[in-house]
Image (tube, rainbow, N blue to C red):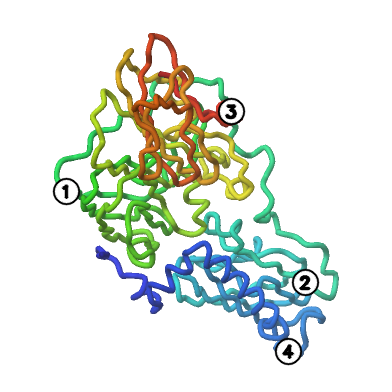
Amino acid sequence: MTTVIDAPRDLERTGSPPTAQAKRDNWLIVVATLAAFSLIGTIVAVGIAIADRDSGGGGGASGGAVTVEVELGDLYINPAAIEVPAGATVTFEVTNAGAMPHDFVVGELGATSMMDPGATETLVVEGIDSSMQAWCSVAGHREAGMEADITVTGGDAGAHDDHGATTGTETATGNFAEIDFNAAPGPDWVPFDPVLQPAPGGTNHEIALSMEETVLEVAPGVTQEIWTFNEQFPGPIMRGKVGDIFTVTLTNNGTMGHSLDFHASKVAMNDEMRTIQPGESLVYQFEAKYAGAFMYHCGTAPTLHHIGNGMHGALIIDPPDLAPVDKEFVFVQSEIYTGPEGEPGDLTKMQNEEWDAVVFNGYVNQYVHAPIETEVDERIRVWVIDNGPSENSSFHIVGTIFDTVFKEGTKLLEPDARQGGSQALDLQPAQGGYVEFTFDEPGMYVGVTHKFANVGKGAQIVF
């Protein structure tokens, strides 16, 4: 069920049915949509978008006035290729046909306002004398495909020029925050608590989640604008039991559209999982029908950017036969893709799977700087959830063997007459589970992902 609080639903604002909105947010459907609009753009380019009102000609003449009809969608601009005469005054008639706000930026020459879904706006740009690009300035939208080439014809059109902008496939060199993996955090640093609390009593859980953009330290001396749930990275670790009812009140306190996808829920994505705009709220209610270590995340397009920028967390639903242990810990593995200091992570890096760090619970080498205390012969359970968005995990602890392994809802190994042991818990993004073990003697034990290139990038835990 979904209840909107103090804000209109997308249906009321746009006139579009929720199903259509959700499909636009769906990454797979976006791909199909892009392909469809590419075909449409080829047909339309014959004569729809640009008409020389004075001469009746195409883009070959210099000067004059032309009109271009532009459609903004999720995540495309149609047409993606625009021709205008050199020196022409161009009137862009821009319509937002998407389910989220967009704008239309023409280099440094002009831009529309941030347009709500269904809105139309006219942008007049005088004297375009060189080729350039136009794009949507919402974070990540340009990199995800919301850009158009404006080609100047006739006259001295000159070379392609962005008027100082960078394209979605280029990144500035030397401008990204750099991580020193040997540095130590400052005296005021507080680690993310890895201790997993028991499931709360009762069967009904009321949870408040806010969504916002928050500048956080992700490595010693390195801050990034992280897109967060409840201003933390990762988001809150939640826990319950099979059959529990979760009622989550979600509020968007940020500056862009966000959403929520609980992998532990079975609900329609066009309802509970739909994108809400700044200032809006909704209620996301579901029954936890299955046991497991589940990811939750923002699903607003481009989903890769929202997850890669830290907007994820974990919900653990205990198996009915879960035995007591001496200590329980939880580690969420994810990647960090740095942008400039204090700014969001770089989407192009995410698309190329070029991560700068792999971390447990959101901070480089966090539990090297704050080792976890345990005792010899204590029975320990460690839950691991790989939230990605793209890298896998092979969780291993140097110096011990796992005698119990639970992965993706089922127990793979437990103590019995076979005396089996496991050396690693293998997880793909959006998978989770737990391992149990003991330490036989005093000393230092190190948890890692056994993809060792990532150990040197921040994925270490000291017990």
Measuring from the top left, give residue 383's x and y in whole percent: 37, 34
Q: Amino acid at mark 1?
A: Thr
Image quadrant containing the N terminus: bottom left
Which of the two discs, 4 and 1, labels the residue nearer the N terminus?
4
Residue at the disc numbered 2: 152
How much space separates mark 2 and mark 1, taking CA atoms?
64 Å
Q: Is residue 173 left or right of residue 268?
A: right
| Picture quarter with the C terminus | top left
The residues tagged by marks 2 and 3 sit, at their Cα atoms, a distance apart of: 51 Å
Q: Which residue is the site of mark 1?
A: 203
Looking at the image, which residue is at 21% across and 53% down? 245
Mark 2 vs mark 4, CA separation in Å: 17 Å
Q: State if disc 4 and disc 2 touch (CB < 8 Å).
A: no
The mark that comes first in sequence, 2 or 3, is 2
Of labels 4 and 3, the one closer to you: 3
Label 2 vs label 3, nearer the camera:
3
Residue occupied by mark 3: 452
If you read the primary sequence from the N terminus, does the residue marked by circle 2 or circle 1 appear first? 2
What secondary structure is found at the residue carrying circle 4?
loop
Task: Classify residue 410 by image quadrant.
Answer: top left
Where is residue 240? Give x, y as percent. 24, 44
376 relative position to 180: left or right: left
Q: Mark 4 and mark 1: span between their CA atoms?
A: 71 Å
Please indicate, yes or no, whether residue 194 appears anywhere in the rendered image.
no
For the point 74% across and 82% down, which residue is it?
A: 64
Left or right of 172? Residue 355 is left
Q: Is residue 447 above or below residue 313?
A: above
Q: Amino acid at mark 3?
A: Phe
Q: State the mark number for residue 54.
A: 4
- Where on the picture, by quarter, is residue 32? bottom right
Are the two marked residues, 2 and 1, in contact with CB atoms closer than 8 angstroms?
A: no
